[in-house]
Structure formats: C-alpha cells, structure tokens
C-alpha cells in the first residue's frame, strides 16, 4: 500500500494565513455589507513600478518574435539579472558576492523551505519564537522534528525566545545547533539587527560549524545607514551563511514572483566520508533538477528594479509603506498600545490590550472594527499576547483602520 510522509500529520494547524482568510471569509458571509480592512498577511497593494511593467511589456514582445523568443532559461537565472544583483545589492555594500553565487527563483518562501532538501534530517534546527511559520512547518515536513506539545512547540527544534525584554533579538543558544533561521528586519516583530549582533551569530556559526539561513526579504525597509542589509556585510559570513532575498516587498512582486538565494562558493561542509563539499554545488544540483527557472518576463521585470528609474520608483514605494508604518505606530501609541517595530520595517508588533489572547484580540478587532491583523500566537508560542499589523495597504485604508481602532480602544 502507498504510504505518506507522516511528518505532515505532525503539523498542528493549517498554515496561518489561510486560517486567517477562512475566519475573515466566515465573518464576511455573515456580515456581507461590512468594509473589511486587511492588515493581516504582508501582501502589497500598490501597483508595480512603471519601470518593471515597461520591461515586462517589452519582454512579452520579445516572446512574440522568432529572433528574441526564449524557451527554457538557465535554471540559476539569467546572467544579466544575476550580475546586476551582485553589483547593486552586494558589491556596492562591500560584500564580495559573485553573480555565480546567486540563484534566481520564484520566491523566498519556497527557497527558505526548499533549502532543507540539501541537508540531512539529523541537523538540529534553531528558530526564534515568534518566527515566520514557514521555517517551522517546512522543518516539520522535512522530518527534522518530533511531535508538537500542547503549546505547539515541536520536539527537536530549538526555540530562541524573542520578547520585549531582549528587544526581540535572540540570545545565542547555549547548546550546539546546526542550522539557524534568522530574519532581519524581522518578520513578525519588526526588530532589526546591528552589525555587532550579526557578528555574534557569525562567530558562533563558525565556531560550531553551523549554517545560518539569513532571510533578508525586508532589507529594503532599512533606512538607518548603520544597519546591515546583508549578512555578508559581516566578516566571515561567506563561510557560514546562505541569504534569501525577494522582490515581493520592495518592488511589489508578491503576485509576480521573483526572489534570489545566495550560496557562497566558500560555504563548505563535511561529508560523512570526511571529504568537503561546496553547498553551492548541491543547491545548484537541486535547482537544476526540481526547478526550471523564473520566467523570462518576470526576470526582465526584476532587472528593471536596478535601472535608475526602477531604483527611484522602488524607493518611493518602500517609503510609502514606511510612512504607513509610521502612522500605525504613532496612532496606536497615542491610543495607549504597547507598540514595537514599524521603523526600518513594514510590520508593527503590539501587545494585545486587556491581556486578551492573540486570537481573542483578532476576533474582537474583526468584530468591532472590521480590521484584520495577525495573531502573534500564529507565529509561535512566545507570540501569545501579541499581534501583528502590516503596513501594506493604501493610505486611505491605513488611516481609516487607525481611526476605527483608536475609537474602539483607548487603553
Ligand atoms: C507575512 O505576512 O508574513 C508574509 O507576507 C508572508 C510571506 O511573505 O510569505
């Protein structure tokens, strides 16, 4: 008889965002005339930058002409895109990253999960708590964990609590871990990492022979010049870190799909026979086998992000969402909420009022203000009692949501 991957049965609940969508749908069916404002999932709302659209329109025209038509592209992505990324995102910030170390994909979400394909199940994985749920759920699916306890914590995972006491910055673990997921600017808390802080992780990883998975999907929201955008700004990181980036949140590609993963060629680990292996080779092998590359049209759109026009338009877009974040942060603080994040980040993380649980506050907010956010407990046990508000929406909706929330709640 056919058997299944029973690791899937260990998963406690459905994936967080579909669960929110389900509750919102039920509410909307019962209350069909309500104007619901969605500040839950971090999905962009503003149109794609003109530079990207123009480049994609041209790419569609290329596909309509025998002379410029493209079939399968390189699995790793077109070199004209990888070269621009290497220069603009890395070399201009002093990171010695070569275009051959960059792999274009259709999403950082997929890459942060798929990366586990090249590592054995025996690796001990550390995640912060709260955390972007993809890291945990894919670790479970890939067999890195045992069962979950009543709090939803999986046996075998090392949880690093982040809270107001430690500024939402995890302490280095006291035990040895092999793979560490870090995300800065942080989803969900909006916390940021300094170079000194990241250096402590790089030193740990190098001393222990561990590998850091650095999710930099929100780096474009960093406005403080002293903060690192890439882990490769830290000396030694090329020997112990893989970085994930995305065009979703900076250029509004959540529906267009384009991202990248950097696997430095200097990142080497031991095989059981004692020999060394470059992880770059394994990731390349994995991608060549299971992935046929992001589409030519989308990659042309992503390339336009690096044109002068594209850079200016992306900056404007990011600033727009950052201003939204500022408004949310300011208004909620004025109403007496305990608020974190929202600076150098599109996410605002707040303490639920009146000691409500995260889901109770979600329901109360939806019922009384028709505003949707994300319950902190959906990001892990230590997120209980917290709530995330996303700055991705139109100015009008953000202002209206804040008007409703601050009228309803005065703490
Ligand atoms: C989020 O809301 O946490 C993100 O939008 C999820 C994602 O990027 O996959």
Image (cartoon, rainbow, N blue to C red):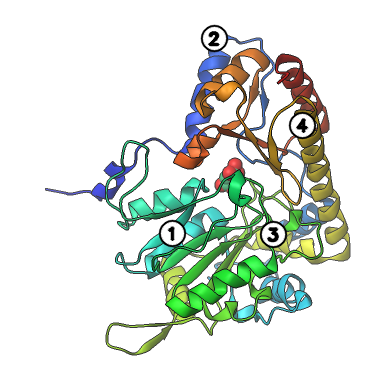
Q: Mark 3: is the Cβ under 8 angstroms from ligand 1?
A: no
**Residue 188 in sight from this viewpoint:** no
**Residue 254 in sight from this viewpoint:** yes
- Horizontal and vertical percent for residue 369? 67, 16
Look at the numbered disc 2 and give the secondary structure of its residue.
Answer: helix
Whether residue 317 is situated above or below residue 56 in the rendered picture: above
Residue 265: name its quadrant.
bottom right
Q: CA distance from mark 4 to mark 1?
A: 33 Å
Side of 368 where 287 appears, left or right: left
| Residue that appears at 51% across and 17% down | 26
Label 1: few (<14), some (14–19) or many (≥20) C-alpha neighbours in 10 Å: many
Residue assigned mark 2: 30
Q: CA distance from mark 2 to mark 4?
A: 32 Å
The C terminus is located in which quarter?
A: top right
Mark number displayed over residue 64:
3
Residue assigned mark 4: 333
Q: Which is in the foreground here, disc 4 or disc 1? A: 4
Q: Earlier in the sequence, mark 4 or mark 1?
A: 1
| Residue that appears at 63% across and 50% down | 167
| Residue that appears at 73% across and 70% down | 89
Residue assigned mark 1: 126
Side of 133 where 238 appears, left or right: right
| Residue that appears at 68% across and 33% down | 338
- Horizontal and vertical percent for residue 63? 67, 61
Q: Nearer the viewer, residue 81 or 11?
A: 11
Look at the numbered disc 3 and give the secondary structure of its residue.
Answer: loop
- Horizontal and vertical percent for residue 194? 69, 64
């Amino acid at each position: 008889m056919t058997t299944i991957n029973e690791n899937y049965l260990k998963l406690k609940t459905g994936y967080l965002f579909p669960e929110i969508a389900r509750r919102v749908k039920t509410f909307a069916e019962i209350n069909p005339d309500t104007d619901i404002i969605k500040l839950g999932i971090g999905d962009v709302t503003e149109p794609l930058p003109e530079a990207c659209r123009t480049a994609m329109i041209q790419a569609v025209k290329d596909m309509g002409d025998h002379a410029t038509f493209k079939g399968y592209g390189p699995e790793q992505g077109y070199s004209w895109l990888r070269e621009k990324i290497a220069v603009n995102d890395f070399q201009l910030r002093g990171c010695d990253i070569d275009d051959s170390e960059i792999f274009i994909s259709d999403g950082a979400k997929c890459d942060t999960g798929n990366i586990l394909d090249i590592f054995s199940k025996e690796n001990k994985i550390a995640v912060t708590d709260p955390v972007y749920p993809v890291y945990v759920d894919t670790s479970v699916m890939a067999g890195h964990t045992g069962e979950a306890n009543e709090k939803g914590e999986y046996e075998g995972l090392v949880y690093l609590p982040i809270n107001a006491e430690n500024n939402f910055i995890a302490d280095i673990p006291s035990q040895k871990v092999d793979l560490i997921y870090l995300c800065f600017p942080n989803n969900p808390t909006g916390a940021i990492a300094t170079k000194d802080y990241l250096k402590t992780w790089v030193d740990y990883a190098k001393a222990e022979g561990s590998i850091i998975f650095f999710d930099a999907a929100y780096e474009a929201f960093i406005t403080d010049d002293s903060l690192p955008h890439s882990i490769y700004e830290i000396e030694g990181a090329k020997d112990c870190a893989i970085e994930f980036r995305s065009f979703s949140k900076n250029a509004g590609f959540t529906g267009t799909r384009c991202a990248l993963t950097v696997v430095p060629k200097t990142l080497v680990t031991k095989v059981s026979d004692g020999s060394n292996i470059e992880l770059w080779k394994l990731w390349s092998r994995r991608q060549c086998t299971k992935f046929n590359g992001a589409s030519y049209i989308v990659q042309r759109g992503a390339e336009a992000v690096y044109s002068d026009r594209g850079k200016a338009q992306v900056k404007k877009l990011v600033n727009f969402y950052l201003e939204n974040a500022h408004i949310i942060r300011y208004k909620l603080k004025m109403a007496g909420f305990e608020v974190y994040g929202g600076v150098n980040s599109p996410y605002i993380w707040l303490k639920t009022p009146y000691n409500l649980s995260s889901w109770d506050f979600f329901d109360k907010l939806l019922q009384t203000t028709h505003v949707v956010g994300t319950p902190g407990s959906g990001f892990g046990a230590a997120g209980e009692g917290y709530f995330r508000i996303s700055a991705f929406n139109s100015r009008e909706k953000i202002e209206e949501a804040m008007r409703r929330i601050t009228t309803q709640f005065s703490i």
